Amino acid sequence: MYSEKRGREFYVLSFFFALFVLFLYGPLSAILILAFQGPNGGLTFPLNGISLHWFRNLFEQQAVGDFGGSFRRSLFLGVMVMVSTVLVSLLAGLAFRRKFVGATSLFYLSVASLVVPSIIISLGIGVLFQQLGLEPSWYSSAFGAHMTWTLPFGVLIMLAVFNRFSPSYEEAARDLGATPWQTFTNVVLPMIAPSLIGIGLFGFTLSYDEFARTLMTSGTYNTLPLEIYGMTTNVTTPVLYALGAVTTFFSFLVIAATLGLIVYLNRRQLKA
């Protein structure tokens, strides 16, 4: 059987891909391994025993850091940003399907925050809240800062989705006597549901691990990325690695649940 000989480009790309995987998963693998240090283990290799001691230590009272509180704040903030990003992106996508005055200017204004440095946005929102006499907080100023990061991605995705969406499906539903609301809920929404789930995952993950836009806007209480950053200067035990392992597992769990939901919706749509 004839087989095409691989050229030099294949091996060059393979080499760079191997480097990419190494730099991506190498540090993560080291953190996951060191999280299982024994009770007398340190922050570096070699391992001094293997145990779950530092994972149990996460749920105990810490001399520094508030793991539980920062995780709950990041989780609630991520959910708030996720829901808001999906709703606003969906409404924006529906609005941009028709031409209206100022559509081009509004589009560029909505995605302009992508080209502004994150720390500048964080600083600007923090200063604005102080000038207005308002206390910056993770559920107000940080929420707004995160929306400037997630919303442009959601709007761009919805514009791409509706750009490929054929209006003939809606016309057929209206010809059969469906109301505009029935057309949207029974025809449009099921077809764009996987994209909305993707936007939700995008919004949650971008918010959950956002650091720069939270730095000046979180107020008194830290989110998880800020808490982890602060711990790097005063925590000298592998409990920090255990926290990293738990948050990484949680991130993969969210991704797996989202992919499972998309597969379920696709199979349900095929059966219908």
Image (spheres, rainbow, N blue to C red):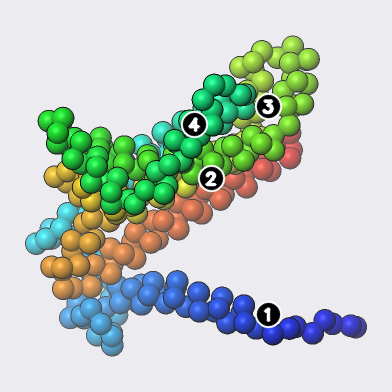
Quarter assignment of residue 173: top right
- The amino acid on which the numbered mark 4 sits, given as a three-letter code, is Ser
Callout 4: 10 Å neighbours few (<14), some, many (20+)? few
Q: Could you tell whether 175 is left or right of 94 in the image? A: right
Q: Which mark is residue 10?
A: 1
In the rendered image, is residue 223 in sight?
no
Discs 2/1, front: 1
Callout 1: 10 Å neighbours few (<14), some, many (20+)? few
What residue is pinned by disc 2? Answer: 198
- Which of the two residues, 84 or 109, is positioned nearer the viewer here? 109
Callout 2: 10 Å neighbours few (<14), some, many (20+)? some
What residue is pinned by disc 3? Answer: 187
Task: Give whichever of discs 3 and 1 has the lower sequence position.
Answer: 1
- The amino acid on which the numbered mark 3 sits, given as a three-letter code, is Val
Above or below residue 162? Residue 102 is above
Q: Where residue 20 appears, x then y in whole percent?
A: 50, 74
- Quadrant (top left/top right/bottom left/bottom right) for the C terminus: top right
